[in-house]
Image: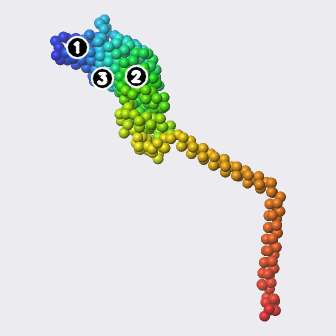
Amino acid sequence: MCSETHSTHNDCPFSCVCARDNGTITCSDGWDTELLGDIPAWTTTLILTRNNISTLHTGAFSSNNGTSLQLTTLSLSHNGIVAIEADAFITLSRLRLLDLSHNRLTYISDRAFHGLYELSSLYLNDSLLSPAVEQLPNALHGTDTLRNLHRLELSGNRLKAIPISRLDRFKLHTLVLTNNSIENIGKENVSSLYQHTSVRVYLSLNPFRCNCELESFYFWLKNSTQCSDAARLMCAEPEAKKGIPVERLRAEDVNCLNENLEAVSYVFLGVVLALIGIVFLMVLYLNRRGIKRWLNNIREACRDQMEVYHYRYEQDSDPRLANVAV
């Protein structure tokens, strides 16, 4: 049933709540499997949540009444969306905020966000399944559309790396990567962050591997204020450092040179011991005859000594000799 507040016009979509004075339409908790057919031209904010929309097809927001939409905010969270086809948002050139959080995306076209020239905020929290995780970098870099993107949220997607290879393609101020599977953001990303100091990154609740490969990230974290939740970054591996804040590590804990030198020292020790063993075996081989003769002499000496002991034992045990002695 239609419900319209602060409006006398009867153009509010069925089962939605409309507020024409601020241009908002809210349609939630429905059983719709398709997007709205006719969206009023006055709509600037469209909230479609907790429905059953599975696919955003090409031109999904083309209005049936022939008027162009002026949407600036679009929320499609909690809809079970699994696929975003190419040019799905092509008609929303004025859109500034797009929320696709809490869906189940398995497919994102390389041109999924094509046409969103004014988009400044993109939310994809808890939305990406494994195939979509791999496709996301191409979707973000696929076109030059997102050059005005200021805020990108990708929390809870099991990302293992930052999906943005070139920060200069965007105008990012905020990058949220919390609660993922990132062990290290890599030297290239660290270098890029050094060059774009205006970017604020959130990285807590990631399982950082605190070994020497974390060196560049560690020094960036210590020397930069770009990571807003730096105090909450914890080591997950190795076991000896588990639970230790990354910031509290010592420089030698992530020093690759020290670790490599230690490995080299063990290798060198092994080589020296192997050489000593080889020399010892060679000495034994070269002196095998002398050693054999020496062993024979020892054996003969031992045998002679045993015969002497045996002879004395027999004399001491003969009772006749004992009576003579008496």
Residue in the foreground of this view, choosing between 187 and 204: 187
- Return the residue at label 2: 82
Q: Secondary structure at mark 2?
A: loop
> Label 3, label 2: how many angstroms apart (C-alpha)?
14 Å
Q: Residue 297 at x, y = what percent?
A: 82, 67
Q: Which mark is residue 289?
A: none
Question: Mark 3 belongs to which amino acid?
Answer: Thr
- Return the residue at label 1: 12
Query: What colour scheme does the image use?
Result: rainbow
Question: Mark 1 belongs to which amino acid?
Answer: Cys
Q: Residue 35 at x, y = what percent?
A: 32, 16
Q: Residue 188 at x, y = what percent?
A: 48, 29
Residue shown at 78% from the left, 81% from the top: 313
Residue shown at 46% from the left, 20% from the top: 138
Mark 1 touches mark 2? (CB < 8 Å): no
Say if residue 274 shows up in the picture: yes
Residue shown at 73% from the left, 54% from the top: 280
Q: As displayed, is residue 197 above or below residue 258? A: above
Which quadrant holds residue 145?
top left
- Return the residue at label 3: 49
Residue in the foreground of this view, choosing between 273 and 194: 194
Question: Mark 2 belongs to which amino acid?
Answer: Val
Instruction: Specify which label sits upstream in the sequence, 1 or 3.
Output: 1
